[in-house]
Amino acid sequence: MNEETDTAAAESLVSLMDRLIEPPVPPPIPLTPETAGWWLLGALVLTGLAYGAWRLWLYRRANAYRRAALAELSAAGDDPAAIAAVLRRAALAAFPRETVASATGEAWLAFLRSTGGFPAQAGPALLGAPYAPPRAGGEAALLRKAADRWIRTHRRAP
């Protein structure tokens, strides 16, 4: 009898397993956010990125004259007259014409010092640059370095 119950139980288990059916495949999970909070967060992120891109564009446009002046400065080499002209053009692009165009001599140097910390050692080379032939020595290199620093760091007029 023991054997008979084991076979009946085994047959009933097999028949029960045969009657099992596969569960249905669940529908695919959508990758779109389903709550309003995620849509709001996405809109805020996109707005922030657009604002950042707009500010970057404004910054690049406002400082285009600096990039142009630095390119001219590198093309000027060690010619003090060309360096002086580049400085004047950069100042005219950044500040009111009335302030820059009439400044000469010590007033020009004072303007450069007050707006960007132009070094006093480069002053004589800058003032004599348009009138004197280029001299050998470190004057031109000092003037070039001072002009580069002023173009990069001066405070622009509001």
Image (cartoon, rainbow, N blue to C red):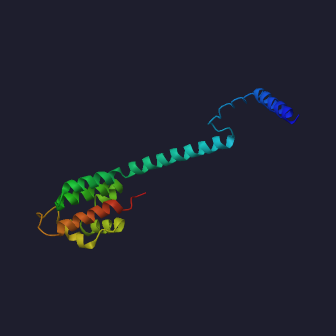
Q: Position of residue 13 (x, y in %)?
A: 80, 32
Closer to us: 99 or 153: 153
Q: Position of residue 61 (x, y in %)?
A: 39, 48
Closer to us: 96 or 51: 51
Q: Position of residue 150 (x, y in %)?
A: 31, 63
Closer to us: 105 or 86: 86
Seen in the picture, residue 40 relative to 74 is either above or below; the reply is above
Q: Which residue, as the protein is rendered here, is positioned at the far bottom?
A: 121
Please indicate whether residue 122 sits to the left or right of residue 42 in the image.
left
Could you tell me which quadrant the C terminus lies in?
bottom left
Could you tell me which quadrant the N terminus lies in?
top right
Q: Quadrant of residue 78?
A: bottom left
Question: Residue at image x 20%, y 53%?
Answer: 75
Please indicate whether residue 15 sits to the left or right of residue 106 in the image.
right
Question: Residue at image x 21%, y 59%?
Answer: 83
Q: Which residue, as the protein is rendered here, is positioned at the far right?
A: 1
Seen in the picture, residue 147 relative to 32 is either above or below; the reply is below
Question: Residue at image x 68%, y 30%?
Answer: 27
